[in-house]
C-alpha cells in the first residue's frame, strides 16, 4: 500500500513539474535540473546506419524514471 501511495505521489509531483515547464521557450540548465534525475542520462555507443551516425540516449526523469 505504501508503494502505491509513493508511486501516486511521484506521478502528481511529475505532473506538477511538467505543467510548470510546459510553456518554456528555451531549455536552460535550471529547468533541465528540475526535470532530470541527477546522473541519469545514459549514452549508448555510436553506430552508423545507412551512412548516418546514431546513438541511443536514455533520459531518466525525476519521479517517473525512464520513459521510452
Image (tube, helix red, strand yellow):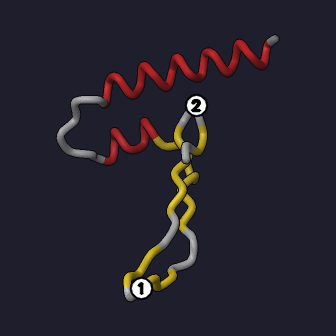
Query: Which residue is depicted at the point 58% across and 31% down?
Result: 63
Q: Quadrant of residue 9?
A: top right
Q: Is residue 7 above or below residue 68?
A: above
Report the disc number at residue 50. 1
Pointer 2 residue: 63
Q: Residue at x 41, y 85 (%)?
A: 50
Q: Nearer the viewer, mark 2 or mark 1?
A: 1
Left or right of 2? Residue 42 is: left
Q: Residue at x 57, y 53 (%)?
A: 39
Report the residue that reaches farthest toward the bottom.
51
Q: Residues within 10 Å of mark 1 (few under 14, many from 20)?
A: few
Near-viewer residue (65 or 49)? 49
Q: Nearer the viewer, residue 4 or 40?
A: 4
- 53 is higher (above) or lower (below) than 10: below
> Which residue corresponds to the image point at 52% horizontal and 40% vertical from the top-left?
61
Q: Secondary structure at mark 2?
A: loop
Image quadrant containing the N terminus? top right
Amino acid at each position: 500500500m505504501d508503494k502505491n501511495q509513493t508511486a501516486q505521489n511521484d506521478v502528481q509531483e511529475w505532473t506538477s513539474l511538467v505543467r510548470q515547464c510546459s510553456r518554456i521557450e528555451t531549455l536552460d540548465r535550471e529547468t533541465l535540473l528540475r526535470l532530470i534525475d541527477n546522473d541519469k542520462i545514459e549514452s549508448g555507443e555510436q553506430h552508423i546506419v545507412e551512412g548516418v551516425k546514431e546513438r541511443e540516449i536514455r533520459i531518466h526523469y525525476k519521479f517517473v524514471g525512464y520513459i521510452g
